[in-house]
């Protein structure tokens, strides 16, 4: 932070020697005996951190000898590093951006999106009326997502181990990553495979190691259309691969596959386009005897392999000894705020406070995602930040009204130095917000195309990269049922429909809709169910015969902390699966108790019915074992056996 203030406060720039002799932090290191090489490495680290936070550092070289960087001067031009003075957002635009920022469930991207939103709020804007009835969620549970997104932003080459489809052979890939694309609710990486010398697309769920940087850097191309090209390629691949599937009428398979069928959901045979046969085989296996692959033959055999593995696994007696000896997985600790994140908070906190005069510690801490204790420490540090005292500078410092802070928990800045203006958006902040906007666009009525187009342009202008292509792209097409439900939510009218539970029971429901949600690639309706006389969440794919009435809704859904909450009559099951599978079934583990032994994870998980467990086990293709209760284990075995037998039935 001291380096930032120093470089902002100079017009002619500072040499390294001047920085080391006058800027707090460097002065202490020199006094402690650090040599010039160590000081140089410290400066380069700090400079790289500022660059990653979006700061443009101007380097003024020796006019006589431009290669002489020893006497180069460094400065941060204020105009080049601040949001344009005429960049404005309407309350409606800010409400849409708030939805976009809330879309991310992945911590790193959520942090980037919310940081970008804070910069807009630091201009003096606040959301007056949030958009109700829509809760987007962009899942990025693949462990490789965050390091790959970081590598894309920094132009860093990476390596990772990749499991090829249909093979247990793992190959190490060296890739220059260019874009992340979500297609059919799965994340794909597009990048140049350096060993092959060609661009390749990788499914993130098949990356089975940590993503490691090689130390090689490359310049990202702002005009790179990799994301759009990848999306077009995935769509073309799906268009060229068709599966003919017979589904039991009215079944879960018929409902879910029917929505994607090119032949229509009520046809005798469903025609389903697909990208990855192995992914589709997992889904079809989960339907057990409800779906039978007619062609292609290779897909049918993949489904058979999965069902056979599940049947054999669950035909053996359950062995709970390893589960009893497994060590409980501790909940993830709250991520501490690292140095780079603290600098970013400081750079936004100061203008945010200046726009709001007196602010309570609790309100400021909530806005910036830190605890009140952390914020107090940051304010104490801020009061020790100032301009260098040597050479050309006055030594002015930040100051705070300590009586207001200590006596009333109120923050009041009395003097600031150099960071009064809001810093430009970083490319990562823009990427996270734009991806969220792409998801917002999937719900009709939330924001029109013109609003979304204007917001993208404003974000790009705020980053100074008006022509930059998307690095994170989300493909979520609008669905007719979703459009009708969105209209019902906005008009506050009742809806009626037939709803099929996983076990096969179909009931007629009348619901006062309160909102649409997306999680794990699945869309849900939440509302007050007249039949159950309580708030319920409905998977839209299980809704049939939807009618939007003109009857005004009379109830509001009760707030719920998550998508689903366990009930008193839930089954508590124990599952065993390889630990690397955990991110792929994270949606089922929200309320689970987890334990690990060697490379296996054991989960005690509450579920509404046995049907959910047997489908989950079948989807796992032998990787997910139901250990208890006994009837659930037997159900998984019988479901797989019935599915196998159904595969061999002749078409009617």
Image (cartoon, rainbow, N blue to C red):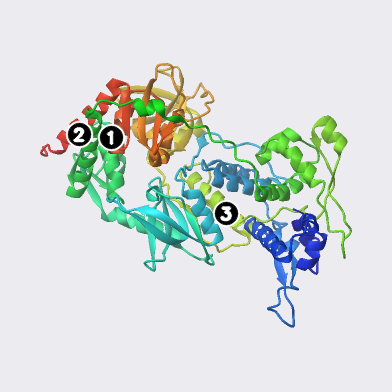
Rounded to the nearest whole Å, what is the CA distance between mark 2 and mark 3? 46 Å
Farthest residue toward the bottom? 64
Find residue 360 and report its image quarter: top right
Q: In this view, does 35 lie above or below 435?
A: below
Image location (x, y in percent) of residue 588: 41, 32
Image location (x, y in percent) of residue 198: 38, 67
Q: Quarter of the image for the C terminus: give it.
A: top left
Q: Which residue is labeled 2 in the image? A: 643
Q: Which residue is labeled 3 in the image? A: 428
Tell me the element at label 2: helix
Residue 383 is at least partly visible in this image: yes
Answer with mark 3 or mark 1, whichever residue precedes in sequence.
3
Side (left or right) of 13 relative to 273: right
Residue drawn at x 47%, y 60% as measured from the top left: 178
Q: How crowded is mark 3: few (under 14 residues within 10 Å), some or many (20 or more)?
A: many
Find residue 611 and report its image quarter: top left
Tell me the element at label 1: helix
Answer with mark 2 or mark 3, whichever residue precedes in sequence.
3
Q: Which residue is labeled 1 in the image? A: 618
Rounded to the nearest whole Å, what is the CA distance between mark 1 and mark 2? 9 Å
Side (left or right) of 224 relative to 416: left
Q: How crowded is mark 1: few (under 14 residues within 10 Å), some or many (20 or more)?
A: many
Q: Are marks 1 and 2 in contact (CB under 8 Å)?
A: yes
Residue drawn at x 79%, y 42% as measured from the top left: 380
Q: Residues within 10 Å of mark 2 (few under 14, many from 20)?
A: many
Q: In this view, does 391 lie above or below 507?
A: below
Name the residue nearer the viewer: 31 or 3: 31
């Amino acid at each position: 932070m001291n380096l930032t203030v120093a470089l902002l406060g100079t017009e002619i720039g500072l040499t390294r020697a001047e920085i080391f002799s006058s800027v707090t932090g460097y002065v202490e290191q020199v006094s402690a005996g650090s040599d010039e090489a160590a000081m140089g490495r410290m400066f380069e680290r700090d400079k790289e951190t500022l660059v990653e936070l979006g700061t443009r550092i101007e380097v003024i070289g020796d006019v006589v000898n431009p290669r002489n960087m020893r006497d180069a001067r460094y400065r941060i031009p204020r105009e080049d590093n601040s949001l344009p003075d005429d960049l404005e957002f309407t309350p409606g635009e800010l409400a849409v951006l708030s939805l976009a920022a809330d879309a991310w469930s992945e911590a790193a991207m959520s942090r980037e999106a919310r940081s970008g939103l804070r910069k807009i709020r630091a201009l003096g804007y606040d959301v007056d009326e949030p958009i109700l009835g829509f809760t987007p969620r962009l899942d990025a549970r693949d462990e490789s997502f965050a390091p790959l997104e970081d590598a894309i932003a920094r132009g860093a080459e990476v390596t990772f181990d990749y499991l090829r489809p249909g093979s247990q052979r793992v190959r190490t890939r060296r890739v220059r990553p260019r874009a992340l694309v979500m297609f059919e609710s799965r994340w794909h990486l597009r990048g140049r495979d350096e060993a092959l010398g060609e661009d390749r697309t990788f499914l993130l769920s098949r990356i089975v190691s940590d993503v490691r940087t090689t130390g090689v850097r490359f310049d990202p191309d702002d005009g790179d259309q990799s994301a759009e090209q990848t999306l077009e390629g995935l769509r073309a691949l799906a268009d060229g691969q068709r599966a003919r599937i017979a589904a039991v009428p009215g079944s879960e398979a018929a409902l879910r596959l029917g929505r994607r069928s090119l032949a229509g959901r009520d046809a005798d045979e469903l025609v389903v386009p697909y990208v990855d046969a192995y992914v589709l085989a997992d889904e079809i296996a989960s339907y057990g005897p409800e779906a039978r692959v007619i062609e292609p033959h290779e897909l049918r055999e993949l489904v058979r392999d999965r069902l056979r593995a599940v049947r054999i696994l669950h035909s053996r007696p359950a062995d709970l000894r390893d589960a009893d000896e497994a060590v409980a997985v501790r909940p993830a600790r709250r991520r501490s705020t690292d140095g780079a994140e603290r600098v970013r908070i400081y750079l936004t906190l100061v203008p945010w406070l200046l726009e709001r005069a007196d602010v309570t510690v609790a309100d400021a801490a909530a806005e910036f995602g830190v605890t009140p204790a952390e914020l107090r420490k940051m304010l104490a540090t801020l009061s020790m930040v100032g301009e260098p005292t040597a050479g050309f500078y006055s030594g002015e410092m930040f100051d705070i009204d300590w009586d207001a802070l200590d006596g009333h928990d109120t923050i009041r800045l009395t003097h600031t130095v150099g960071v009064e203006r809001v810093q430009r958006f970083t490319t990562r902040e823009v990427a996270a917000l734009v991806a969220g906007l792409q998801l917002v666009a999937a719900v009709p009525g939330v924001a029109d195309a013109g609003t979304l187009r204007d917001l993208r342009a404003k974000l790009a202008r705020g980053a100074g990269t008006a022509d930059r292509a998307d690095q994170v792209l989300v493909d979520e097409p609008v669905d007719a049922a979703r459009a009708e439900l969105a209209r019902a939510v906005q008009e506050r009218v009742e809806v009626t429909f037939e709803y099929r539970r996983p076990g096969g029971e179909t009931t007629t429901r009348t619901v006062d809709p309160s909102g649409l949600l997306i999680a794990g690639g699945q869309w849900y309706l939440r509302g007050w169910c007249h039949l159950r006389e309580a708030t319920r969440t409905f998977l839209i794919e299980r809704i049939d015969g939807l009618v939007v009435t003109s009857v005004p809704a009379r109830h509001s859904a009760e707030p719920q902390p998550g998508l689903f909450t366990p009930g008193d009559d839930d089954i508590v099951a124990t599952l065993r699966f390889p630990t690397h599978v955990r991110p792929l079934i994270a949606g089922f583990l929200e309320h689970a108790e987890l334990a690990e032994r060697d490379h296996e994870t054991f989960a005690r998980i509450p579920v509404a019915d046995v049907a959910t467990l047997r489908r989950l086990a079948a989807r796992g293709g032998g990787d997910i074992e139901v250990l208890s209760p006994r009837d659930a284990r037997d159900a998984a075995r019988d479901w797989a056996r019935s599915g196998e037998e159904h595969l061999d039935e002749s078409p009617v």
